[in-house]
Amino acid sequence: MRQNFHTILETILRLQREGFINVGYRIMWKLLNVHCGVPASQRTVRLALQTLTPELVNARARRILHRRVYTNRGSNDLIHIDGYDKLKPYGIAIHGAIDGFSRKILWLKAGPSNNNPQYIARFYLNFVKETKRIPRCVRLDDGTENGIVRDLQTAFVLSQQDSTDMPPFLRGRSTGNQRIERFWGSLRQTVCEFWRNYFREMRSSGELDQLNPIDIQCIRLCFLSVIKYQLMVFQSTWNVHRIRAQRHCQVSGIPSVLYHQPQVYGYEDRSLPLSCNIGILQEIIDEYSLEYPLYGCENDFLDILEEITGVDKHAFTLPTNVREAHELYVSLKECLNGYRI
């Protein structure tokens, strides 16, 4: 038992060093059991966190929120999409979507921008292609980055016979996008606060100049793969964690179960069938959307690296953890000294 507790402590410390510093015991319990293969009870994880970071546990325990009651009629009745900009000063933008009923994360992406409407359209269209369904309504901000998604959602919904009970999209200020704004708070605590502090320290030490485009390209090449992995872990963990019953919540349970089996809880999947075949949808994807660039970097920058290293840019080996990312960043800065994009 003592040896197992020691293993749990060591694994938690490693996860915290990798950025999972502000997670609660339930998320940490999922990380240990599902992603690290370390068996642990929730009680043991709670005790371990109280031992390692008592100040963070106490801070979370004191937090009291008063929220409005949020309701809708089932999964895909209303999905919320939005961008998260807290890492933008360091060249990394995040975009996500969450189902309002189940709180299941539908996508969570990191890249060089969340303002290009073609990137946002690609996330939306990939979701439609994967599910072969159309959400009944999309809640988004009133910005140009959402223009293509608004038009596509309107066209898809209005092509259905059963499409008159609610508008195809709702728009408004980002601060009013209640469901996903609450979600961003959880993401900030779990993942992004670590990276904000990490990049601030790099800036303070002189390693990072935010006004230097080469530094920003290096940040993306070195750190984006690690951040993407952490977002993937966060998404998969979030979607299988249990949401407790609360006064402001319509339903409680596991997001993935709520999303895929709403009938168990007395609700229904409110999505609409895709009105075109996959071939036509692929043509729409090719015409109206774009993938993120390779590694999130400009092609000219990758060409320079290809020339310096002699390695094909499509075959670069990317870091898998914070230490490797930082070491690669320092090495790249040394190699690129004297180059300008």
Image (cartoon, rainbow, N blue to C red):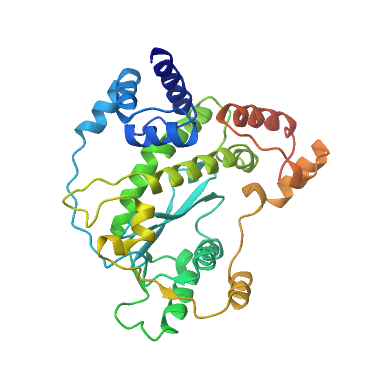
Spot the residue most to the bottom: 161
The structure residue drawn at horizontal position 24% and vertical position 56%, both measured from the top left corner, is 251
Q: Residue at x 42, y 15 (%)?
A: 6
Q: Where residue 52 sits in the image (x, y, percent)?
A: 35, 19
Query: Which residue: 42% across, 79% down?
Result: 157
Q: Quadrant of residue 21?
A: top left
Taking depth in this image into account, of 335 and 169 the one nearest to the observer is 169
Indicate the position of residue 255 as horizontal and vertical percent values: 35, 52
90, above or below 37, in the image? below
Q: Nearer the viewer, residue 293 or 126?
A: 126
Q: Dividing the picture into quarters, in which one does residue 286 lie?
A: bottom right
**Left or right: residue 244 compared with residue 272:** left
Position of the N terminus, as image quadrant, is: top left
x, y percent for residue 278: 59, 74
Q: Is residue 175 visible?
A: no
Residue 72 seen in the current view: yes
Q: Position of residue 301 (x, y in %)?
A: 71, 46
Residue at horizontal 64 percent and vertical 41 percent from the top = 221
- Count of numbered labels shown in the rendering: 0
Residue 284, by quadrant, is bottom right
